[in-house]
Amino acid sequence: MWLNILPPLLIIGTLMSVPAYVSPYINLYSVGKKHRRTYNTEIEKLGYARDLTLNQEQWKLNGLEVISD
């Protein structure tokens, strides 16, 4: 009886995971890079510069835990 649940569960699980794997390639085609981040305002540009300074990865968002005392 519970085996009837497995096919819809697999279909829904697959369809829900597709955007996570497809969106980097859509961004690569449309924007030119896998990650998508805008730099329209000064605070966004400062955040980008901060991320590069703190851990040399612009696509990984940082919190207060990476700032040394």
Image: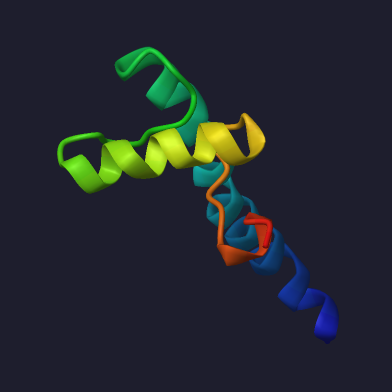
Q: Please provide percent x and percent y for residue 61.
A: 53, 49
Please count the marks in the image: 0
> Camera-side residue: 44 or 37?
44
Residue 6 x/y as whole percent: 77, 69
Residue 66 vertical position relative to residue 23 in the rendered view, above or below: below
Residue plotted at (55% across, 44% down): 20
**The N terminus - image quarter:** bottom right
Residue found 39% across the figure and 25% down from its top: 27
Residue 58 seen: no
Q: What residue is drawn where x is 49% and y is 44%?
A: 19
Q: Quadrant of residue 47?
A: top left
Q: Residue furthest front?
A: 69
Note whether 35 is above or below 6 in the view shown.
above
Question: Which quadrant holds residue 65?
Answer: bottom right
Is 67 above or below relative to 53?
A: below
Query: Which residue reaches farthest left?
Result: 41
Q: In this orientation, does residue 40 appear?
A: yes
